[in-house]
Amino acid sequence: MKKIKIIDGPNLNLLGKREPEIYGSETLKDIQALVKSHIINRKYEFEASFFQSNSEGEIVDCIQNSNQSSNGIIINAAGFSHTSVAVLDALLAIQIPKIEVHLSNLFKREDFRHHSFISKGVNGVICGFGSNSYLLAVDGINKLI
């Protein structure tokens, strides 16, 4: 069976508590359950595994390891999207399909959030649809793998 890795970056472990007016009331576990259910309901021929870290190095390691263990990546690098050349380099170094997601619309937020370093290393970007951003990314990764 094919596998996708969903990688979540810093502070996403606080979803549901952190700035619910921006990120909503769903927790990361809620989003993971939605993703699993979406994969089953769409009868996609892959399964998802999830990884969250507040550490840039752990995210880089996860991306690198995913090249061997996964058929595609969905990544919400959160704040690292706007700061991390290391995460970009890891994404560029692997050959599997990759989609960047964000819960909020980055272009309606602070100016520094309007640029994502990691966008150059992915096949596509989805932002602004809340937890549905992940579901749209699952649909997209299905087409790519």
Image: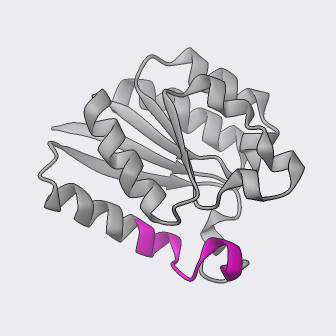
Coordinates of residue 119 in the picture (x, y in percent): 64, 31
Q: Is residue 91 above or below residue 131?
A: above
Left or right? Give the position of 104 relative to 29: right
State the extent of the magenta-drawn residues as a range.
Answer: 20-31
Farthest residue to the front: give it.
108
Residue under the image location 73 percent in, 78 percent down: 19
Left or right? Give the position of 67 relative to 17: left
Camera sees residue 23: yes
Which quarter of the rendering shows the N terminus? top left
Q: Is residue 112 above or below residue 93?
A: below
Residue under the image location 27 percent in, 33 percent down: 143
Please name whichever residue, 24 or 51, is drawn nearer the observer in this view of the structure: 24
Q: Main secondary structure of the magenta part?
A: helix
Residue 29 painted magenta: yes
Which quarter of the rendering shows the C terminus? top left
Picture quadrant where residue 100 is located: top right
Residue under the image location 64 percent in, 43 percent down: 58
Please name whichever residue, 103 or 63, is drawn nearer the observer in this view of the structure: 103
Coordinates of residue 42 in the picture (x, y in percent): 16, 55
Farthest residue to the right: give it.
111
Picture quadrant where residue 50 is located: bottom left
Left or right? Give the position of 57 relative to 7: right
Coordinates of residue 93 in the picture (x, y in percent): 57, 16
